[in-house]
Image (cartoon, helix red, strand yellow):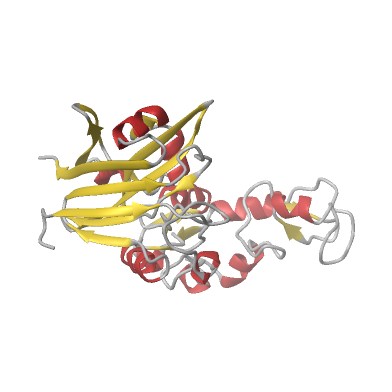
Amino acid sequence: MAPGGSACKEVVESHSPVADYDIASTKSESNTTTMKNAVSFVGKCGIHSNNDVYELLECPVCTNLMYPPIHQCPNGHTLCSNCKIRVHNCCPTCRYDLGNIRCLALEKVAESLELPCKYQNLGCHDIFPYYSKLKHEQQCRFRPYNCPYAGSECSVTGDIPTLVAHLKDDHKVDMHDGCTFNHRYVKSNPHEVENATWMLTVFNCFGRQFCLHFEAFQLGMAPVYMAFLRFMGDDNEAKKFSYSLEVGANGRKLIWQGIPRSIRDSHRKVRDSQDGLVIQRNLALYFSGGDRQELKLRVTGRIWKEE
């Protein structure tokens, strides 16, 4: 379909035992394997210091780099504060009680080190002081994205091209070219709204990808339906775009206009913030027409780029 064309799709909600989808779950949805582009710790060759020092700073239990407080046993064996709790205050090397001894000398040595970001292989080539590295990595723009699929606890991570291929090949989501859409969401029993989710749709628009979500849930005591858009990229890029959603019938309509949320924000976070088109069930059934015993809700919308 040519860019700017309209995607028209009828999405039928099905009766999966886990949640409601319009296709069956696949084995890949329980896959806990990270994609090829997923993160890995930077190799020792990237350290601007002696390899032996690097090894001293690796926790022997979790193998992650240690940050203050670094604990040690009476025999000098060290481990991180998280693992001290995990091993029940017993040194995993010599089995002595750890007590509350800090390894201040090793903490001081760490201050002199400069390390590359662990996402170096994904494009980040900056070097950071040891104690600044962790804070940077939590917000690094090269860090992998989580899979945006809302229908399962998918643990796959990767860059955007990797996730687009994953969504298409493993989750079998609908892919459309174009910046306008016209979807009809169907549910045979609209009185069941507990965490019902329809198939995700991905739009290729302006050379970027957008995820259209539609689901039903309880908002307090009120059953509602909600449609919203997420951008496959960072928040600063998402703000360059806007979108609108519209639903209506019988001379009445609801219109939502907003900025797509980055997939850095989980689908649940966006849903719970009500940052999208929220439709009360009674109104959704009114828009569906007929005897109001079946949901047949048509949602139209478009995406545009802000100048």
Q: Is residue 289 above or below residue 3?
A: above
Viewer-closest of 55 and 150: 150
Q: Residue at x 11, y 55 (%)?
A: 5
**Quarter containing the N terminus:** bottom left
| In the rendered image, the vertical position of residue 221 relative to residue 179, given as above or below | above
Is 29 rendered above or below residue 208? Answer: below
Does any portion of residue 278 appear in the rendered image?
Answer: no
Dividing the picture into quadrants, the one containing residue 293 is top left
Tag count: 0
Q: Quadrant of residue 90?
A: bottom right
Please tell me which residue is depicted at 63% across the width and 68% down the height of the picture. 55
Camera-side residue: 222 or 39? 222
Residue 206 percent across, percent down from the top left: 15, 54
Q: Is residue 105 left or right of residue 276?
A: right
Residue 85 visible in the displayed image: yes
Q: Nearer the viewer, residue 36 or 29?
A: 29
Image location (x, y in percent) of residue 289: 30, 35
Q: Quadrant of the C terminus?
A: top left
Residue 238: percent from left, percent from top: 26, 44
Q: Nearer the viewer, residue 1 or 159?
A: 1
Residue drawn at (53%, 54%) of the image: 112
